[in-house]
Image: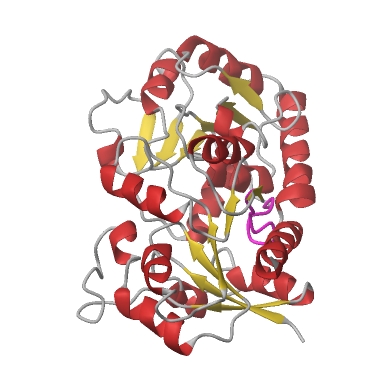
Amino acid sequence: MNRRVLMVPPIRWLPYRESVGPDDGPVPQRLDAALHDLGWDVDVFDPGTRPLNPFGGMNPLLQSFDPLRALTILTRKRHYDLIVCVFDGGAVPLLLLRRLALFRTKIALWDVGLTETWRLRLHVLNYVLPRIDGVMVLTTRQKQYIETKWPTRAPVQMIGHSVDTVFFRPQPVELADYVLSVGNDVSRDYKTLFEAVVPLQTRVKIRTSPSTVAHLEQPDNIEIIPKPLPFPDLRTLYAQARLVVIPLVETLNAGGISAVLEAAAMGKPMIVTHTAMLNDILKHGETCLTVPPGDPQALRDAIGAVLTNTDLAHRLGAAAREFAERTQSQPVFADRLSQAMTSFAST
């Protein structure tokens, strides 16, 4: 009989999971199926909405505190072998109340919102990390950072990330004449990208929120594609691009990892700013070209090198796709996730 794990996300997962079709976007059930074959059955318990959840509709950290969800887990969902809180907020009420409820099921984290400036999140991390029964992180550097900063009850396990290589796959479309960049979080360094492409004739499309680049003077050859964008349209953007560029700054979190793996799964040549947090997946000269942070000349030279060398572009794209299938696909990731969950549930 399979073990059972309850996923506790910081935002509502079920509406997407229940509506996505096989080719509408990444399909979470593919990961569920791989975990089932490895001996784990997955359930999801979303945060509630107002008025039952007084934090409903707020930012994901606050929304994940949901006291009713925590009480329901502690009193009515005691048959699970493991509770996995996605990010750290959902673990707070569970850890606060589990002794009162005599709740013995182990509670683990999957991904951690690291920060050195957001006081509320720092209080959450300082409470959760020393008390949680297991931590799963995306990168080796996150593991090192947590182990250095906090005394944890259980080992921190680096399980990496995954991408749906069935949905994100090379498409039989004609290449268009543009470079693509993707991303909306604080890890993006669009200032350096703008400076790099000003002297170039190359068209650049950036899928991001206009507010992300509102403070920058936008070159004429750059087009901003505002979010949200349906996944099939995003896939088409990737497929038609000659090159994907992910410009980054150093952060405590794995900024850019989803975009890098999506582009890799699409078989696209990439240029990525080298950051310590992405060291596990950036293979310079093999699956991508990397450039130093904040160096527009290096980025400009790399863009020119890929756009003028068809053989290099093809080699990088093919190697990126092979890397994504071999190490980051959902079945491969499921094995790492399953091993970590088994170790936490068994201790």
Span of residues in magenta: 160-171
For the stretch drawn in magenta, the main secondary structure is loop
Quadrant of the rendered structure where residue 135 is? Answer: bottom right
- In-front residue for pair 293/61: 61
Answer with left or right where residue 25 lies relative to residue 159.
left
- In-front residue for pair 217/276: 276
Quadrant of the rendered structure where residue 304 is? Answer: top right
- In-front residue for pair 296/242: 296
Does residue 226 appear anywhere in the picture?
A: no
User: From what the image shows, is residue 321 above or below residue 104?
Assistant: above
Q: Residue drawn at (28%, 49%), measured in percent from left and top? A: 120
Q: Residue drawn at (76%, 43%), measured in percent from left and top? A: 323
User: From what the image shows, is residue 239 above or below residue 294?
Assistant: below
Q: Residue drawn at (54%, 12%), measured in percent from left and top? A: 298
The quadrant of the picture occupied by the C terminus is bottom right
Query: Residue 198 location in percent, x, y?
Result: 39, 16
User: Extreme top residue here?
Assistant: 297
Answer with left or right where residue 252 lies relative to residue 133.
left
- In-front residue for pair 29/313: 29
User: From what the image shows, is residue 21 above or below residue 154?
Assistant: below
Query: Residue 175 location in percent, x, y?
Result: 61, 40
Query: Residue 74 location in percent, x, y?
Result: 44, 81
